[in-house]
Image (cartoon, helix red, strand yellow):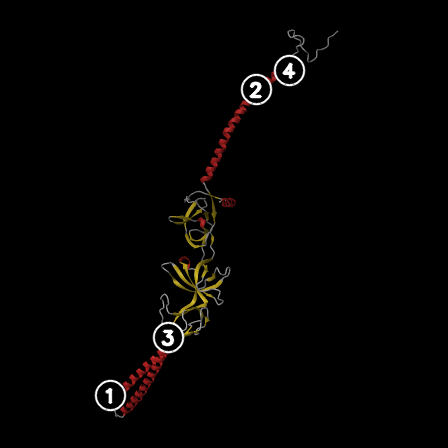
């Protein structure tokens, strides 16, 4: 009989091993292939590990070098923010301190000596011009006036007699009844008597004027602020004005319905002050209230000591809101006929050779320009010369900024971000 074919996985029985030992040919081949593949992949793995180790050390160095290069390039041309000069406002408010004073202020003294017979007004009384404030009793002066009037009557009689005599002698001279010398003597006597009469009349007028000063009258409309007399007080003609203690002042009167304020305008602003300059006052007693005023007169000369212009400002005070002697703030609206350009104060460089600004040219290089400062607006200043409209002026330039330095102009977003960080 024919033997059947051996199966594919025919088992070989080795005589040396015995029948229980079975060897698979396919498994042996698979193990041998795996070992070969492992031997081939080992160099590849080692190469990958070496590459990874190299990348861990080299790549960061390369990245750091690239970042350093970029940083150096960025620092080589600094980034700056620029501002454009703009037209300065034509009007500027100038705030100055001022002291409120009465429009008229007078110390009233006795013009004649005597005793106070009666006084009619006290502190705070509002009086009119010519109103009697007090009466002075002067009996001696009254007697002198009576005597002077009697002397005037005698002089009048003597003159009348001398005048009629001289007239008669002139008539007789025409008929040659008297000599020329006698007629001239009578005429000369008449002239002497007339001079004596005029002297007596002048004395009467003087004493009458002194007697009229027995009544102390107010020189103008105002308020009595001081009363230094009482009934029976002895007063002396003229007093002793200017002395401390009791200067002899009877009353003190101030005109308060209209007030005046004196201010000192700095020399730089004096040229903008005119008679039509708008002005108003503010005080701490009335927050938010403005008191309209007007420029009354100017000294038109700079004080060589303070370098200021003396200015007088008048204000209507018929409502009595302001008091003489109070402190007030004066607001002057200065008008410039030809306003220049202005820049923020932060754009200025103060160098030994003067005030300078840094302008970025079309080639992105810095050009330093000397400027002339005009009006001061606080955070902004007027630049009279040195810049033009359209210039790109560096804002907040560094102290080390030099002429010809290359810069990069920041964009609006970058400038805003830098401003927030600052």
Q: What is the secondary structure assignment of the residue under circle 2?
A: helix
* Residue nearer the viewer, 379 or 85: 379
Q: Residue at x 46, y 67 (%)?
A: 258
* Residue nearer the viewer, 331 or 333: 331
Q: Earlier in the sequence, mark 1 or mark 2?
A: 2
Quadrant of the rendered image containing residue 75:
top left
Question: Which marked residue is nearer to the observer: mark 4 or mark 2?
Answer: 4
Question: Which marked residue is nearer to the observer: mark 1 or mark 4?
Answer: 1
Q: Which residue is mark 3?
A: 114
Q: Which residue is mark 4?
A: 27
Q: Residue 368: percent from the left, percent from the top? A: 41, 47
Q: Residue at x 56, y 20 (%)?
A: 42
Neighbor class of circle 3 (other Cα within 10 Å; few <14, some 14-19, many 20+) is many
Q: Earlier in the sequence, mark 4 or mark 2?
A: 4
Q: Residue 7: percent from the left, percent from the top? A: 70, 12
Neighbor class of circle 2 (other Cα within 10 Å; few <14, some 14-19, many 20+) is few
| Cβ–Cβ under 8 Å for marks 1 and 4 | no
Q: Taking 215 as reference, is 336 above or below it?
A: above
Q: What is the secondary structure assignment of the residue under circle 3?
A: strand
Q: Which residue is mark 2?
A: 40
Question: Which marked residue is nearer to the observer: mark 4 or mark 3?
Answer: 3
Disc tally is 4
Q: What is the spatial separation of the Cα atoms under label 3 and label 1, in whole angstroms?
A: 53 Å
Q: What is the secondary structure assignment of the residue under circle 4?
A: helix
Q: Which residue is mark 1?
A: 181
């Amino acid at each position: 009989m024919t033997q059947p074919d051996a199966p594919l996985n025919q088992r070989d029985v080795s005589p040396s091993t015995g029948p229980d030992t079975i060897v698979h040919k396919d498994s042996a081949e698979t193990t041998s292939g795996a070992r070969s593949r492992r031997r081939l992949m080992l160099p590849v793995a080692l190469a990958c590990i070496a590459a990874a180790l190299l990348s861990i050390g080299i790549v960061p160095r390369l990245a750091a070098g690239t970042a350093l290069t970029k940083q150096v390039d960025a620092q080589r041309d600094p980034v700056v923010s620029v501002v454009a000069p703009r037209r300065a406002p034509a009007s500027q408010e100038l705030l100055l301190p001022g002291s409120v004073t009465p429009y008229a202020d007078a110390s009233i003294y006795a013009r004649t000596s005597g005793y106070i017979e009666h006084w009619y007004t006290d502190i705070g009384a509002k009086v009119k011009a010519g109103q009697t404030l007090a009466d002075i009793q002067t009996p001696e002066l009254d007697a002198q006036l009576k005597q002077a009037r009697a002397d005037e009557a005698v002089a009048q009689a003597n003159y009348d007699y001398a005048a009629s005599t001289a007239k008669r002698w002139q008539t007789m001279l025409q008929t040659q009844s008297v000599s020329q010398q006698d007629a001239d003597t009578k005429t000369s006597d008449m002239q002497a008597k007339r001079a004596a009469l005029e002297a007596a009349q002048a004395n009467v007028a003087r004493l009458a004027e002194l007697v009229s000063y027995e009544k102390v009258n107010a020189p103008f409309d105002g308020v009595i602020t001081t009363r230094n007399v009482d009934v029976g007080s002895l007063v002396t003609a003229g007093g002793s004005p200017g002395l401390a203690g009791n200067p002899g002042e009877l009353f003190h009167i101030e005109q308060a319905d209209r007030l005046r304020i004196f201010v000192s305008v700095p020399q730089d602003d004096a040229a903008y002050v005119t008679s039509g300059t708008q002005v108003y006052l503010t005080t701490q007693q009335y927050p938010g209230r403005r008191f309209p005023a007007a420029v009354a007169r100017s000294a038109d000369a700079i004080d060589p000591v303070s370098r200021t212009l003396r200015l007088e400002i008048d204000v209507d005070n018929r409502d009595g809101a302001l008091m003489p002697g109070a402190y007030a703030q004066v607001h002057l609206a200065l008008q410039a006929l030809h306003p220049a350009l202005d820049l923020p104060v932060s754009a200025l460089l103060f160098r030994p050779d003067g005030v300078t600004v840094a302008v970025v040219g079309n080639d992105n290089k810095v050009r330093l320009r000397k400027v002339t400062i005009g009006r001061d607006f606080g955070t902004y200043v007027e630049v009279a010369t040195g810049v033009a409209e359209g210039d790109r002026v560096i804002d907040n330039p560094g102290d080390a900024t030099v002429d010809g330095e290359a810069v990069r102009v920041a964009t609006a977003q970058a400038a805003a971000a830098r401003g927030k960080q600052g």
